[in-house]
Image (cartoon, coloured by chain):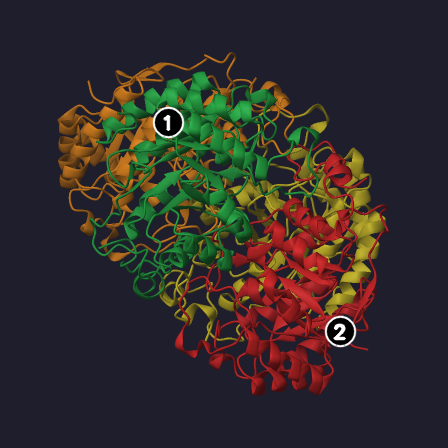
Chain colours: A orange, B yellow, C red, D green
Amino acid sequence: MTSFDNKFPGKDITPDDIVSKFPLAAKKSPDHKSRFEIAGVEFGGSLVPVFAGPNMVESEELIVDVAINIKRSGAHFLRGGAFKPLTFPYRSENYGETRELGIQWLATAKKETGLPVITEVMEERYIPLISEVADILQIGSRNMQNFPFLTACAKSGLPIMLKRHYGASLRDWLGAAEYLLVEGNTKVILCERGIVAPHTHRSTSRFLLDLQVVPAAQEVTHLPVVVDPSHATFWAPWVRSMALASIAAGADGVMLEVHPDPPRAAVDPLQPIDFAALSSLMSDMDSVARAVGRTVTN
Amino acid sequence: MTSFDNKFPGKDITPDDIVSKFPLAAKKSPDHKSRFEIAGVEFGGSLVPVFAGPNMVESEELIVDVAINIKRSGAHFLRGGAFKPLTFPYRSENYGETRELGIQWLATAKKETGLPVITEVMEERYIPLISEVADILQIGSRNMQNFPFLTACAKSGLPIMLKRHYGASLRDWLGAAEYLLVEGNTKVILCERGIVAPHTHRSTSRFLLDLQVVPAAQEVTHLPVVVDPSHATFWAPWVRSMALASIAAGADGVMLEVHPDPPRAAVDPLQPIDFAALSSLMSDMDSVARAVGRTVTN
Amino acid sequence: MTSFDNKFPGKDITPDDIVSKFPLAAKKSPDHKSRFEIAGVEFGGSLVPVFAGPNMVESEELIVDVAINIKRSGAHFLRGGAFKPLTFPYRSENYGETRELGIQWLATAKKETGLPVITEVMEERYIPLISEVADILQIGSRNMQNFPFLTACAKSGLPIMLKRHYGASLRDWLGAAEYLLVEGNTKVILCERGIVAPHTHRSTSRFLLDLQVVPAAQEVTHLPVVVDPSHATFWAPWVRSMALASIAAGADGVMLEVHPDPPRAAVDPLQPIDFAALSSLMSDMDSVARAVGRTVTN
Amino acid sequence: MTSFDNKFPGKDITPDDIVSKFPLAAKKSPDHKSRFEIAGVEFGGSLVPVFAGPNMVESEELIVDVAINIKRSGAHFLRGGAFKPLTFPYRSENYGETRELGIQWLATAKKETGLPVITEVMEERYIPLISEVADILQIGSRNMQNFPFLTACAKSGLPIMLKRHYGASLRDWLGAAEYLLVEGNTKVILCERGIVAPHTHRSTSRFLLDLQVVPAAQEVTHLPVVVDPSHATFWAPWVRSMALASIAAGADGVMLEVHPDPPRAAVDPLQPIDFAALSSLMSDMDSVARAVGRTVTN
């Protein structure tokens, strides 16, 4: 019996949903878990892959420097935004030029370090360009229910990380994943990154990391569930605590914002941790992972 | 002084935001209010226009029937979805075929009644088709922060109704409006349709109509603010109460879901009101509007 | 059929709750509505009584001045806090001495104007003292589920206004009301005063006025539902809009914070409106009330 | 610098609050952490004490059985409710008689096993009775801002666990703790037990465990922060995951609901874990604790 079979009033997901609304995302049995490889890294198994890198691909030097350093710490994927959804149409002065250039710089960093790359795609027309460097396409929170775009991404055949919208229920999220799976794309990763919540301890962010969604999602879906504590907390000093908690909660991966010099980050400077913090955190995450029968580093 | 000038901690919007993040959406003075005409109907003045129609354009007969009846009740715009964002990729049996056909049927209804039309657009490539019938393009909640799409819609030159995402702050919403305004499109209407909120009286919906956002938005922006109580409440018996409250709160328009036979609606049958309820509500809305110095019917 | 009978998943209140959890608070038929008189003012009928006054009974002069002025505007009850729940144990310098003295001052204001009084009680041992002046005992949000205290208040025999906790569901609220009704106390009034909600347009308050709860509550309970827009908005310029909306939504009363000189209010100076604003609002509320078949002033 | 010093708009807690609103609860330096012993168990040090037991003290046999078994698993405190806040005034048939009897039964269990006891107190007049058996007084969520009661509990001199209200901000919670500390009571423990949140993955509960509040609270207060994953998740299968995450997040204790036969629990049968699950969880919690430099069992 799962929680969705019981008689308690107020379910988000009903037994019927599992059968008829997201049959491909739903588990077929309690032990059902997707396992697949992306760029030689296994998802859904005992390894807990780590994605690390800056919010924005600010320059070639920066992204190569980050790639070298996160690789040294044992991270598995380089993350960095070239195409970025901005809340307002005006860029701040220090934002710089990224987009096509950012994709080139990511390619350089990948070539220099051999690290596979994940980066956000925001428009169908850029899928071919981004596919040249990305091992995983990231669909951002704000596009989680941009359904025609989901279909276009799925058709690329590339692995996809689907970030949860900060207002989305688990049911909404699995519905969006189903749009990807129905196209025959099986390498789909879910990523929790904080939800809107009442103002309970707001100091730097309006988001709250929802770790309870990890066991909730894993109860109904076989897809790997990654957690991004950097965007949720929006505050570097809380990232270590929430990254370790994510792994203990059973997350199938962790995404971290890392910058060589956080106070000088082009965007959201309160959020990234630096190389030393990452290195120490990788070791601590591995210890926690081993305590729950998994590993972060080899 | 607006609420955003005071020293209380915890502002969503700062004075600096108003100047640098959404200068075009921001009021220039306390009395600043956009007034413009769409298809001969004035927005931002004393009239409170009403948009009415079914969730989905189910058939030509249905949409023509609705158009005739809402016109008789005094509604100003026919609404109806031809392209619809579905949470899951599978259509229910009674969903029917809409999309291109739905647009044709809306055109018939418009021709037969003379009522102007508002309908949702979900993809850039359908803007030309939809523009043939729509007097206003509706951007749905789920696309509120699909920024390249916002730009494409704005460039069409058509008036736009921007629905607020159910997880969006006022700041996010005005940022999205700024993307439309910066393209030179000045006929932009905001529409509140319910937000995610703690489970306070959930019986049929997970949304809560946020009427407090009406004065909050009108404090900082000159754009008209419409309210859609049907999607928020998801429960027809509460629509009358919330429609009247919207007008008393100062809403610049009301959007209502109307169906000739609600229990047989193809989607969300708990939500629409029928023709008799609309007719009675139009009269009551007009009485409330007159009590606050406005009108609904002429 | 009410919304609680339908099959939609995710109900807060089930049909069984209505029968077995709060049978006294529940309506016996769709038209069931409590009507009772307090100090000559009818509740649950066509009148929409108005409660007005300062957050705190700061001094005898102030409360008498307020009583005279709100009576002139047509308000029905004088409100004012003598015993006040403070979030922190330290009083600010300008807080002054209230408590027993405040009760005396309320008695003076009542004697001078004839206005009935509502004031908050926080401890069982003060019920006798407060009963000497209060026509209605107010149970504050923070005590909504202080069950032994609810019982003690109910046993006083005095009419009670039960404010909803800002985190409480409708089910929780009706459960608390049932504790009052089960003691044989039938003059119970519910009061909505804002809930915690995601940070959607926070500028001055962390609360959001929940007007949707008015029709939701009235669907299942026969008790009158009052709305307090001052505490929810925490921002005087939004109070008018939300007070008018409350009446249009069907509220059975409105509670307003009024102060002769808001910027000098001892607590929460952003919240109260002044006498001129009240006077104008009373007239506008009456117009809206008449538009929906009710009245505020005679 | 803490998060509360930065310039980001929208803080819940300001630097001034720390100085003037809760000076006793606030840290004096970044390393400031309260360490104290209760019944020989140290709080605020490297040990992470575990509180285990049933929601309700159903019978003498049951509570003695639980005490023996949780002691065998290494738990540090026996928890169990004798006086319980019920949402509705009617008890279900299987609720049984507890209250004074429950206190006696707890005393028996304590005598037989030597385990110290924590139990909820709901009324000032029962403090003396409960003090005879309780090593820690538990103040429930619903009484978190019952200020006169907080003062009465503090004056008992007994150690206190203050559960966070499900609608309370961190600021509200620390304000309530300050009411305890200002009476000279220094053995105060905070306990997070889930907050109301948008309906993101509701299946069994309307609460969401807020683990982000652990680092947030520890950033500003020196008081130990315990986490109760049972009440938040309301679903036994998620408890293990959230208990491990709590420890990894840095919690200073964990409270678990344990019952010999969960489906037959008198209240909330979906929530408790059984003895075998506790035993296995104690071992896993210890492994995670050791991974972050702490211990659960000796």
The vertical placement of C198 against A109, above or below, is below
Mark 1, chain letter? D
Q: Residues within 10 Å of mark 1 (few under 14, many from 20)?
A: many
Along the line of sight, the residue nearer the viewer: C173 or A163: C173
Q: Residue A142 at x, y = what percent?
A: 44, 41
Question: In the structure shown, which secondary structural element does the residue marked by tag 1 occupy?
Answer: loop
Q: Chain of mark 2?
A: C
Give coordinates of residue B22: x percent, y percent. Answer: 41, 61
Badges 1 and 2, same chain = no
Q: Residues within 10 Å of mark 2 (few under 14, many from 20)?
A: many
Q: Residue at 65% across / 52% down in the picture?
A: B228
Q: Quadrant of residue D180?
A: bottom left
Q: For the residue marked with disc 1, what is the amino acid?
A: Ala
Which residue was labeled with disc 2? C286
Residue A70, visible in the rendered structure: yes
> Which labelled disc corresponds to residue B278?
none
